[in-house]
C-alpha cells in the first residue's frame, strides 16, 4: 500500500501502547493516540518519528471517542484501530466473591464497553479502507487465576465480542492478541511490592504485532509469542 496508513491506538502514553505506536511509526504509519495523562501523552507523542495527533481523554467518555473518530477522519480515515487502553481494576486483586460491584462495573465499562463503542464508531471508515481492529487481551481471559476474576471476566467478554465481530465482518480483519506477561505499570499494579524485572519489556513483542498487521493474517485469537518473526524469537 503506497498511501499513508492511519492507526488509532488507545492507551499509548506508556507500556505496550507506546511500544506499538513506536513500531507502527517506524513502519510509516500516521497515528492518532490517546491516554488519560495529558503530560505523559505529550511526551510520548514528542518521542514518535511520525505524524501524530495526541488527544488526552478517557476512552470511557463518548465525547472523547467521537474526538478520536474525527481526528482519524481528518487524516483520511482509519486503517487500524488498536484497542489497548484498559484498567486492571481493584488492586491488590480481590477474590471474585469480594469484588466491589461498583469497581467491577467500571472495569467492564473501560475494558469492554468502551472498546466496543469505539469500534462501532470507526467501523464505517475501516470497512471503506479494508482496515483492521486489534484488541489487546490476556491469558486471564481463558485461564482461572486466583484474584483475576474481574479483569479476566472483562477480557473474556472482549474476546467473545471480538470473535463475533470477526464472524460478522467480511472486509475488516479482527484480531485479539495476548501479549504475554510484560514489564508494565499495570502488571506491577497486579503484583504490588514484587519485583517484576524478569518480565520482558513491551518492545520485545512488537515485531510480532507488526507481522500480524503487515501480513494481514486471518481474523482470530493470537499470542504475541507465536507471531514473532523467526529471527526475532528469543
Image: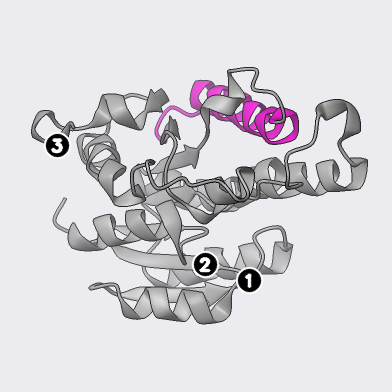
Q: Which of the two marks, 2 or 3, is nearer to us in this view?
A: 3
Is residue 114 on the magenta stretch? no
Q: Is residue 27 above or below residue 48?
A: above
Query: Along the polypeptide, which appears first: circle 3 or circle 1?
Result: 1
Q: Residue at x 43, y 56 (%)?
A: 15
| Mark 2 → mark 3, Cα distance in angstroms | 29 Å
| Image coloring type | one colour
Q: Residue at x 54, y 63 (%)?
A: 69
Question: In screen coordinates, is 80 left or right of 153?
Answer: left
- Which residue carries the number 1 mark? 57
Residue 175 visible in the shown view: no
- Which residue carries the number 3 mark? 232
Query: Along the polypeptide, which appears first: circle 2 or circle 3?
Result: 2
Q: Please name whichever residue, 162 or 143, is drawn nearer the observer in this view of the structure.
A: 143
Q: Which of the two marks, 3 or 1, is nearer to us in this view?
A: 3
Identify the magenta region: 148-172
Q: Could you say which disc has been placed on residue 34 in the image?
A: 2
Amino acid at each position: 500500500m503506497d498511501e499513508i496508513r492511519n492507526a488509532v491506538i488507545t492507551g499509548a502514553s506508556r507500556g505496550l501502547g507506546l511500544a506499538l505506536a513506536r513500531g507502527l511509526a517506524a513502519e510509516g504509519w500516521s497515528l492518532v493516540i490517546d491516554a488519560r495523562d495529558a503530560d505523559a501523552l505529550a511526551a510520548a507523542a514528542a518521542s514518535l518519528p511520525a505524524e501524530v495527533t495526541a488527544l488526552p481523554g478517557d476512552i470511557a467518555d463518548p465525547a472523547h471517542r467521537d474526538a478520536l473518530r474525527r481526528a482519524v477522519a481528518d487524516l483520511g480515515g482509519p486503517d487500524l484501530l488498536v484497542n489497548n487502553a484498559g484498567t486492571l481494576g481493584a488492586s491488590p486483586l480481590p477474590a471474585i466473591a469480594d469484588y466491589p460491584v461498583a469497581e467491577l462495573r467500571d472495569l467492564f465499562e473501560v475494558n469492554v464497553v468502551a472498546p466496543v463503542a469505539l469500534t462501532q464508531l470507526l467501523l464505517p471508515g475501516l470497512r471503506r479502507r479494508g482496515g483492521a481492529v486489534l484488541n489487546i487481551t490476556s491469558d486471564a481471559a481463558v485461564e482461572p487465576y486466583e484474584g483475576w476474576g474481574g479483569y479476566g471476566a472483562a477480557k473474556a467478554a472482549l474476546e467473545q465480542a471480538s470473535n463475533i465481530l470477526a464472524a460478522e465482518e467480511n472486509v475488516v480483519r479482527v484480531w485479539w492478541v495476548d501479549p504475554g506477561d510484560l514489564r508494565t505499570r499495570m502488571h506491577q499494579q497486579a503484583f504490588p511490592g514484587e519485583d517484576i524485572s524478569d518480565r520482558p519489556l513491551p518492545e520485545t513483542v512488537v515485531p510480532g504485532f507488526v507481522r500480524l498487521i503487515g501480513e494481514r493474517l486471518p481474523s482470530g485469537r493470537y499470542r504475541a509469542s507465536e507471531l514473532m518473526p523467526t529471527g526475532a524469537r528469543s
